[in-house]
Image (spheres, rainbow, N blue to C red):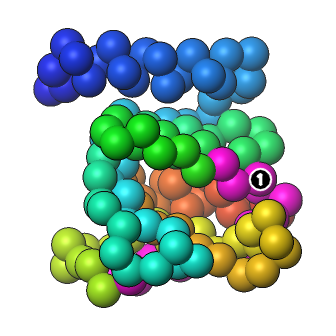
């Protein structure tokens, strides 16, 4: 169950995607960081949403956003750790080309991992 404070924050985050077709989302993805930013990032929960053209993440607190265009995704992996952090369970790791056209990655602990993987693979044509 999500507290009222976080529910309000979740509603604000989802409103940013208004007008986009949200295919799948979770209110409680646990973010493990972005590879290009190094291992000192704070892990935190937030909303992870998938539309026809983007994978969008916004952390509840602190307010951090990550938008990955599906056209930039190079692969999907399911390691048990990312940037030296682990939950000892498989993570959703997205390998993508960042704004500098360099390979980068980000990872989340999500429920229904296999469903996330299958839907993203279908959308990117893999």
Query: Measuring 24% from the left and 78% from the top, which residue is drawn there?
Result: 86
Of residues 110 and 85, the one drawn nearer to the viewer in this rendering: 85
* Magenta stretch, residue numbers: 67-83
Q: Quadrant of the C terminus?
A: bottom right
Identify the image quadrant of residue 1. top left
How far from the left and from the top, in percent, is residue 54?
Answer: 72, 45
Of residues 39 and 47, the one drawn nearer to the viewer in this rendering: 39
Q: Is residue 15 above or below residue 75?
A: above
Q: Is residue 125 left or right of residue 75?
A: right
Residue 126 in view:
no
Asked if residue 80 is among those painted magenta in the image, a careful observer would answer: yes
How far from the left and from the top, in percent, is residue 44?
Answer: 29, 52
Residue 28 in view:
yes
Q: Is residue 41 left or right of residue 66?
A: left
Q: Is residue 71 left or right of residue 85?
A: right
Asked if residue 81 is among those painted magenta in the image, a careful observer would answer: yes
As drawn, the residue found furthest toward the bottom would be 84
How far from the left and from the top, in percent, is residue 113?
Answer: 41, 59
Identify the image quadrant of residue 73. bottom right
Q: Please, what secondary structure does the residue beneath circle 1 have?
A: strand
Q: Is residue 65 above or below residue 43?
A: above
Query: Measuring 65% from the left and 77% from the top, which residue is drawn there?
Result: 104
Q: Counting other residues with Cα less than 10 Å from the Cα at mark 1, is it few (<14), some (14-19), or many (20 or more)?
A: some
Which residue in the protein does label 1 denote? Answer: 69
Q: Is residue 18 above or below residue 46?
A: above
Q: Is residue 91 above or below residue 53?
A: below
How far from the left and from the top, in percent, is residue 8?
Answer: 33, 14
Q: How many marks?
A: 1
Query: Measuring 77% from the left and 55% from the top, which residue is drawn there?
Result: 70
Query: Measuring 58% from the left and 77% from the top, which residue is drawn there?
Result: 36
């Amino acid at each position: 169950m999500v507290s009222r404070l976080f529910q309000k924050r979740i509603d604000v985050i989802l409103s940013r995607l208004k007008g986009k077709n949200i295919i799948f989302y979770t209110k409680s993805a646990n973010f493990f960081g972005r590879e290009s930013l190094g291992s000192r990032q704070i892990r935190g929960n937030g909303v992870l949403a998938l539309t026809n053209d983007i994978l969008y993440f916004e952390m509840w607190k602190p307010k951090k956003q990550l938008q990955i265009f599906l056209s930039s995704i190079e692969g999907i992996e399911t390691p048990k750790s990312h940037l030296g952090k682990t939950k000892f369970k498989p993570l959703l790791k997205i390998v993508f080309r960042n704004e500098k056209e360099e390979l980068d990655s980000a990872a989340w602990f999500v429920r229904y991992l296999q469903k996330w993987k299958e839907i993203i693979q279908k959308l990117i044509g893999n």
